Amino acid sequence: MAIMLSELENDKQRHKLNWLFFRRALMLAKPYWTRKGAWKSWLVVVFICLMIAGFSWANAYVVKLTGEVTDALVDKKSSLYWSLFTWSTLFGVIIFGARVIQSLVGALLSLHWWRWLTEYLIGNYLYRQTYFHILQDEKIDNPDQRIEEEVGPVCDIIGAFPLQVLGSISNMGVQTSIMVSISSSLFFCVIGFSIFQSLAIYLMNQPIIKQQFDITVAEADLRYGITYVRNNAENIAFYRGEETETNNISARMKNVVKKQMRNMIYSIYLNLMNDGVGVVWNYLPLIVLVPMYFNGEISYGTIAQATASATLLVDSLTVLSSYIPQLSQAVPHMVRVAEIHEAFLKLKSNQQDPDNHIVLKQSDTIQLKDVNLKTPKGEQSLVNQLNLQLNRDCRLIIVGRSGVGKSSLLRAIAGLWSNGTGTISLPMEENTCLFLPQRPYTFEGDLRSQLYYPAEKSPVNDDELKKLLNKVCLEDLLTRHGSLDTVKDWPHTLSLGEQQRIAFLRVLLLKARYVFLDESTSAVDLPTEKALYKLLETTGSAWISVGHRPSLLPFHNQAMHLQKGGQWTIRSIEELAEHEDDI
């Protein structure tokens, strides 16, 4: 049965519109609004705020005109009526055009913020293997989806604050002052009812937050289930697992439907409540003012003026009250983006904390000093008090039984695993250290770019690339697949052995000072393995290998034997060759 992330127990504070929400909103907004050149964005905000103030004044004038037009109509003053009517209409058109400009400027600001924040998050995501660490954190699901889909709603809802909240408050202040001048009773009724309405809307929208969060995560679960089939198509096909995967995806789909159905029913309930509130607003001015009109205290035009003022006040309150549901719906987006940003900050902090994490330092050679390495969650000690110096001529092989931490030690040197204590010094210049995992990284694209990855362009011409293909025993690759410009899905086109040979070609091409090989010849035959290591000898590189094959020993001059419990010993190649069971 599929495990739903939305069903896992999580922090209840994530589902509330509380101070944590606003603190996270401020944290996400701060980088954009304090960046270099942020004055241009602030200038746009000032422009919007000035327009908001102008609209509040304009609405007050429209309300005044409404009363005068109504009185002119009742008094049958034809020329005055048509003059006021024409001016009122023209003024309304001007206000409409200004609002269009304001909305366009606000939308452009939100779009610029979205683009900047997305690039900012991607930059942090790809900074010093942060993406790798985040994928190890079970609390951060679907980081790619979070960056792609959640940033936009966050920028929209925060960017709407001056336009909706400040504009509504400004307009409410102006319209309230008009009501006070007409009737203090109406003023107090409006204030009392608006407080009641805002509090009721806030309380009624609290369940929406949890519902929206569950829908967001359930939809992410569904996308993950479908993507998982694509990424593991061959293995699923071998196992004939189509029925199981269909059931898993169907379970995820049912979970999405269940969450959406609950939200839909509750939304209908909220809409009915809002409609009821609207009916009250329509009749409240009449109930208060009509008796005053019958008593001769106000003119008929004053009723129209107060009604128009109340309508504008209702509109402002509606915008303000509708912003609360928008905030409620934005909580899941805010939480999911903020969690990634907080993970960035935590990782940067951990990298500077020598008491709980291994510290990486710049050096000309590789040196491990008092290194204690643990698994990412700290449940197992892999290496204790390791001190090791790897010079430019080292050829070290790391051996030991499966699960003792051989590959983990390479990950620690690469900076991927840092849970532990001690210091690892190594060269950090680009392409100085090259790590060759058991399954090399290849991608969809042209064949040429596979060969010189991670460089952005080839340091040699195509003829040299073809010669290197021959050296790593891939002389028939172009014959079978065409030219170096051939574009294919290479991870699924090339065998694992071919991908491992391409990894060795990269070593020859990039001329790294140190090469780390983690079972990097496990999928090639012994003659090819011998040929590849012979090529390494011509590069002048130092290398550190992890492997189980006794055939690797002749290509190394020193061995490290890892044992359970974090114990380790340095042994000679000759001694290790006599005890092949330790490899």
Image: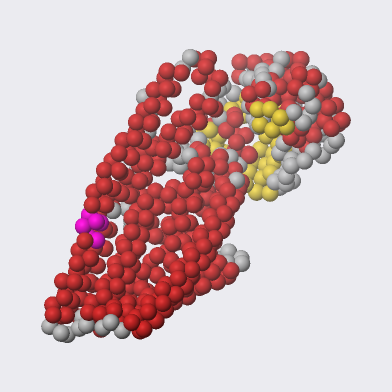
Q: Is residue 276 magenta?
A: yes
Q: Establish if 103 lies above or below 53.
A: above
> Is 126 placed left or right of 169 in the picture?
right
Q: Quadrant of the C terminus?
A: top right
Residue name at image x 66 percent, y 32 percent: 443
Measured as percent of width and height from the top left, residue 408 is found at 57, 33
> Is 182 placed left or right of 497 in the picture?
left
Measured as percent of width and height from the top left, residue 75 is found at 26, 83
> Is 80 placed left or right of 543 in the picture?
left
Q: Nearer the viewer, residue 400 or 377?
A: 377
Q: Nearer the viewer, residue 115 or 393?
A: 115
Q: Establish if 420 lies above or below 342.
A: above
Q: Establish if 4 lies above or below 161.
A: above
Residue name at image x 37 percent, y 79 percent: 82
Q: Is residue 246 visible?
A: yes
Measured as percent of width and height from the top left, residue 153 is found at 45, 52
Q: Main secondary structure of the magenta part?
A: helix
Measured as percent of width and height from the top left, residue 251 is found at 36, 28
Residue name at image x 61 percent, y 15 percent: 581
In the image, the segment drawn in magenta is: 273-278
Q: Is residue 339 visible?
A: no
Q: Establish if 296 lies above or below 384.
A: below
Instruction: Describe the colour scheme in one phrase.
Output: secondary structure
Q: Is residue 117 magenta?
A: no
Q: Quadrant of the N terminus?
A: top left
